[in-house]
């Protein structure tokens, strides 16, 4: 990662938590309940999907109970994944066919997906303490992306986690769908905000597929422009 003091301190730290990470007592207790109820599910911190030489990093909130927590791959197995992966394929950030199964062979192209919080929280709501505690893994992940040009934050928690990781005051960059932020201390990296592609947001009309596609279109255009200017 290009020199940023706050982030540089996390370089080389573990990017993936232990399967039995117990740093968040409420989440590890919830995980044990799910392991007992669904022994065939993944039921562990969900690792980042994609390689750290990608120029685009997509940041979600946390694994969905029956999505990533069940399958072990971010956004895989629930509605949010249908919209996200279809959009990524359309804009050239993934290739193959998304079949809601980590064995579907889908490949990400110059892109990776991670979550602000790695363990499934009850009712999709991590506490502030849990978000703060899991930041060490997000920070180490971010620090490992050596060619990063774009971050898409899916929702305000992902947006805030990114700014806090970089030590940037939240008041300088308000979250808003479609907003694009130049990140202090990370030259050449832009943060693109999108409402989360959850079923709730799409069912209520907060986020339409067109609004979501517009964010990816902007990233695609900017990455192409960046490639041409090199
Ligand atoms: S959310 Fe992160 S820090 Fe908390 S238990 Fe899971 S992996 Fe560990």
Image (cartoon, helix red, strand yellow):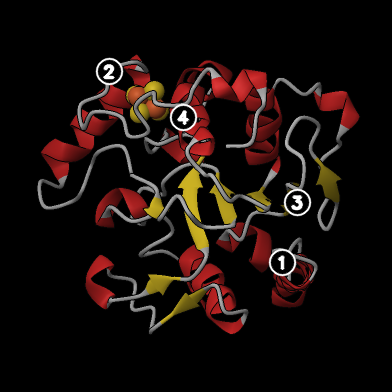
Who comes first in sequence, dot 3 or dot 2? 2
Whole-Å distance between the Cαs marked 1 and 4?
24 Å
Q: Is residue 123 above or below residue 32?
A: below
**Between 123 and 224, the one nearer to me in the picture:** 224
Where is residue 68 drawn, in percent x and y?
35, 53
Where is residue 140 drawn, in percent x and y?
46, 29
Label 1 crowding class (10 Å Cα cut-off): few <14, some 14-19, many 20+?
Answer: some
Q: Is residue 47 above or below residue 173?
A: below
**Kind of element beneath mark 4:** helix
**Kind of element beneath mark 2:** loop
Q: Say which residue label 2 marks.
A: 22
Q: Considering the image in quadrants, where does the C terminus appear?
A: bottom right
Where is residue 116 drawn, in percent x and y?
52, 37
Whole-Å distance between the Cαs marked 3 and 1?
16 Å
In the image, which disc is placed on residue 193?
3
Nearest to viewer (mark 2 / mark 4): 4
Where is residue 50 drawn, in percent x and y?
41, 57
Who comes first in sequence, dot 3 or dot 1? 3
Extreme residue in the front direction: 230
The answer to whether mark 3 is within 8 Å of ligand 1 is no
Whole-Å distance between the Cαs marked 2 and 4?
18 Å
Q: Say which residue label 1 marks.
A: 223
Q: Say which residue label 4 marks.
A: 140
In the image, which disc is placed on residue 113?
none
- Indicate the quadrant where residue 56 lies: bottom right
Q: Is residue 66 above or below residue 209?
A: above
Whole-Å distance between the Cαs marked 3 and 4?
21 Å
Q: Considering the image in quadrants, where does the N terminus appear?
A: top right
């Amino acid at each position: 990662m290009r020199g940023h003091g706050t982030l540089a301190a996390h370089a080389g730290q573990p990017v993936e938590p232990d399967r039995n990470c117990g740093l968040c007592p409420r989440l590890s207790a919830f995980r044990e309940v799910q392991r007992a109820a669904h022994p065939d599910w993944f039921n562990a911190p969900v690792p980042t999907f994609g390689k750290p030489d990608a120029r685009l990093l997509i940041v979600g909130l946390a694994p969905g109970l029956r999505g990533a927590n069940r399958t072990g791959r971010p956004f895989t197995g629930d509605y949010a994944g249908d919209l996200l992966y279809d959009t990524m394929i359309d804009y050239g950030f993934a290739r193959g066919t998304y079949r809601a199964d980590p064995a579907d062979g889908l490949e990400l192209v110059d892109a990776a997906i991670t979550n602000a919080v790695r363990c499934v929280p009850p009712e999709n709501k991590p506490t502030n303490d849990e978000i703060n505690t899991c930041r060490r893994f997000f920070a180490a992940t971010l620090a490992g992306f050596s060619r990063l040009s774009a971050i898409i934050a899916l929702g305000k928690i992902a947006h805030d986690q990114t700014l806090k990781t970089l030590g940037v005051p939240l008041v300088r960059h308000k979250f808003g769908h479609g907003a694009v932020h130049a990140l202090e201390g990370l030259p050449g990296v832009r943060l693109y905000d999108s409402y989360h592609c959850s079923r709730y947001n799409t069912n209520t009309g907060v986020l339409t597929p067109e609004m979501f596609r517009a964010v990816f279109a902007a990233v695609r255009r900017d990455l192409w422009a960046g490639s041409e200017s090199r």
